[in-house]
Amino acid sequence: MNRVRLPWFRREMSAGRFALVMNLPTLLCLGLVLAYPVGYAAYLSVHRVGLAQLRRGEFAFTGWENYGRVLEDPLFWVAIKNTLIFTVITVSSEIVLAVAIALLINQAGIWTSRITRFLILLPYAIPPICNGLIWAFLYSFQFGFLNRILFSLGLINDPVNWAGNPDTALYAVTVPYIWRTLPFAIILVHAALQGIPRELYEQAAIDGANAWHRFTKITWPMLQQIIAIILILRTAFAFAVFEEILAITQGGPGDATWVAAWYSYKITFAPPNNFGMGSASAFILTLMVAAIALVYMRLIYRRVTL
């Protein structure tokens, strides 16, 4: 008996082939949106590229010269130091505040909880550049509401130049960034809290455990995996902070708020517009973030998933 060979479009596909077909549009979009720009940036990072070279379309190959110039630039290491300080402050503050606020929401009544969730999500809906402009107005030396509030409470006698003082500028920028990104961490922690069985708390209460013991023996161990994920994601995003720097301080005063992303931007787009060196600095930053993420994965995430 002769077997009828069906056309390819009528044959039953395997699970792997079906998954490939369904993900093909996404892969093509990622290839166009991410792969080409990243590849072109890698190409620029090993060539001498300025405005003159862009006009001529002739890029001289320099090998690792751009990377060496970035690593020898003292301003690059100032930016890395500021980035590390910024990251430690913002990430640690977000984790502590996210756990505290999520616990508070989890204990509130259902209607209060819904209203609180809505209010908490508002900062996350504001575009980063708009968030920076709002806080730049709040920090204004002459017209800022922050100085007005502190003066009315008797906490200061003279206006404070929060964003214009080298000693306070970097710390001032951390506040609007935390305010904007904190909802992301709160949502994840709150979702993890919802997944903890209530029976564990009931049994602990029967055994005489107080609130602190319930938190340290039940809540915190159950949250460690999501905390590790937040730690990895927020560190990567904190290393790439740019909008708040642009809107509030523009790297100043002096180099007090020069962070890694701002360094790459200024090297690339400020005269003499060294696109090759800017691309090299961006790739160095990417490698640093990847190294930190690997350390997190080995020391934290693997430990809490065992």
Image (cartoon, rainbow, N blue to C red):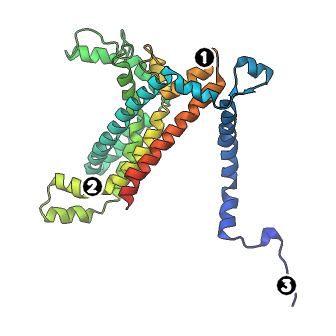
Residue at 26 percent of width and 48 percent of height: 108
Is label 1 in a helix, a strand or a loop? loop
Q: Position of residue 234 (x, y in %)?
A: 43, 40
User: What's the amino acid at mark 2?
Assistant: Thr
Is label 3 in a helix, a strand or a loop? loop
Identify the residue position indicated by label 2 in the image.
Answer: 219
The image quadrant of residue 38 is top right
Residue at 57 percent of width and 32 percent of height: 282
Q: How busy is the neighbourhood of tag 2: few (under 14 within 10 Å), some, or many (20 plus)?
A: some
Asked whether 22 or 167 is in front, the reply is 167
Q: Is residue 262 above or below residue 119?
A: above
Real-space CA distance between mark 3 and mark 1, rounded to the nearest whole angstrom = 70 Å
Real-space CA distance between mark 3 and mark 2, rounded to the nearest whole angstrom = 62 Å
Q: Which mark is residue 270?
A: 1
Q: How busy is the neighbourhood of tag 3: few (under 14 within 10 Å), some, or many (20 plus)?
A: few
Which of the two discs, 3 and 2, labels the residue nearer the N terminus? 3
Q: Residue furthest left?
A: 208
Identify the residue position indicated by label 3 in the image.
Answer: 3
